[in-house]
Image (cartoon, grey):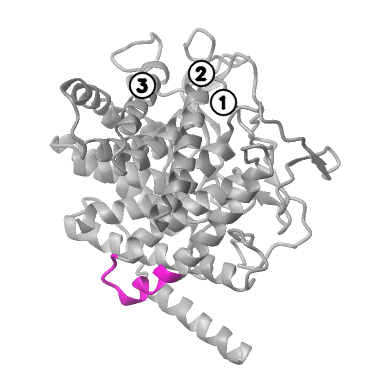
Amino acid sequence: MADTGDFNHALRQEQENSTRRFSGYLLPDAPSEQDLLTVVDDYEAICHANIEAILDRFERHDGSYPFVDTKLDLQSGADFDATDPVRGRDTIYGWIQGRGLEALAGHAHWSERSPDARTRALTERLRSMESVVLDSLRQLRSANEGHLFFFMSPDGGPFVLAEDGSQAALAPDPETPSGYSDLFGSKGLFAAARDLGLPQIEAEAQAWMTEVSEDILARRFTSDQQPLDPTNPIEALPGRYGHGAYMIQLGACALGATAGDTGAVDMGLRLMEYEIGTHANMGGRVAGFEEGDFWEFVGEDDLPLRMEDGSVLCDPGHALEFVGLAYKFLRAAQQLENNPRTTRRLQAVTEPLPTILWQIFSLGFQPQPGGICKAYDLVGRRPLHTDMPWWSLPETIRSAAFCYRESESAEVKQRSLAIWRDCHNAFVENYLRPEVHLMAIQTLAIDGSISAAIPATADADPGYHTGLSLLDVIELFRE
């Protein structure tokens, strides 16, 4: 049996080698194609280091913890207290397991095609972990009448946090509508089943994704997110309808379209047409707002929802993420043989994307210190919540890269490069931690200090926001 000290030394050496391949290159004012290829090299180093750390953390449990484990402090790299009710190992986040499963499948697809032997060597490990997490996710769902929940115990018991911080059990109910854990879980299960060649489970996941889509379109969908940041109220309110689920489900439609499902193309178009027609101000549709404005919530009348103080909330990160997932879906849909009507619909929903990208980036990006604010008031034209979560930067890098590649307009290309440059440089300079597996700090305050705020889950990103976004950029430039 290998000496533990030797193993740990070898592990540290490999982590150092992965980090050493990362150059930290910053984009100049006017990036050239070669500049872009240089940062794409760094994106491969980031993805490699991130997912390898996730594999290492999984394998160290030697089968005793069959879940994605990103329960670490992103400043120090140390494990969280195992008994912490929010951060500990007995708190399973449905969001993280679903996102993590999709990330494992996406990284396996990338690694097996990589020209780098060290990256190709990750493939077998990725699929081994992917298979175990897939089984665990299905068991969690089976224990919960076909659903997943934000907080669960390792045996699947759903819970919420009581006022005293203790865990209060929830009773699973088959009549519960779909929530975000179901959304992330279903598309993660689909991606993994397809990657692993499991057609029966793929069909199971496809049916689950369809249930989620139907709940979204019927406005039955509910958020299962639990409040962990008192400055970011997330409770569901009657008559308030957000676009988040529509936007994220575009990722599921992209997966389906890539698999050749024409039904996924129609569903993705319905989601995009709703978002652009209800949440975006295109062609001066709603008086008093600027072209390309994108509001987070609408009321029963499908108009921008005004808060008690008269403000209209925009979540810039969500709007910018929409652009990237929309392009990802459209790229997959356009690979299929579409009838003339579908082709016209695809063209119609493509046209507003550059305007939304530029407008929302202009509103949300904070040049000092460099990041995208969490909330912006479209009436007062000012930031409402100046915390800057990490995830909106790689998501916007993906959006800008797609826009740069897909557009034939010189002006759109130039603007897209400027957005990519600013997001890339802010991400590298302010968020990335080379000493912690090239992972990113979750949240910065407007003064550039690290914020203690938890943007959604205490668990770190399992290769979803950062990894899958950057993998799409890598694929665009490695074709």
| Lower sequence index among marks 1 and 3 | 1
Q: Quadrant of the N terminus?
A: bottom right
The answer to which of 443 and 182 lies nearer the viewer is 182
Per the image, the residue denoted by label 3 is 276
Please provide percent x and percent y for residue 235. 66, 28
Q: Which percent across, then down, holds residue 470?
A: 36, 54
- The residue lying at 48 percent from left, 14 percent from top is 304
**Which x, y percent locates residue 19?**
43, 73
Residue 218, disc: 2
Mark pair 1, 3: CA separation: 19 Å
Q: Name the one closer to the observer, 422 or 153.
A: 153
Count of numbered labels shown in the rendering: 3
Labels 2 & 1 near each other (Cβ < 8 A): yes
Q: Earlier in the sequence, mark 3 or mark 2?
A: 2
Q: Which of label 3 and label 2 is nearer to you? A: 2
Q: Mark 3 touching mark 2, by CB under 8 A?
A: no
- Given the image, on which type of amino acid does mark 1 rest? Phe
Q: At x 61% / y 74%, what residue is drawn?
A: 60
Q: Nearer the viewer, mark 1 or mark 3?
A: 1
Residue located 49% across and 41% down the image: 204
Mark 3 surroundings: few (<14), some (14-19) or many (≥20) residues within 10 A: some
Check if mark 1's residue and mark 3's residue have beta carbons within 8 Å. no
Amino acid type at circle 3 is Ile
Along the horizontal axis of the image, is 263 left or right of 187?
A: left
Q: Which residues are magenta?
A: 113-124
Front one among 33 and 182: 182
Query: 10 above or below 20?
Result: below
* Magenta span includes 312: no
Residue hosting label 1: 221
**Left or right of 406 on screen, residue 210:** right
Give the amino acid type for the residue marked by disc 2 in the picture. Ala
- Residue at 35% x, 59% y is 109
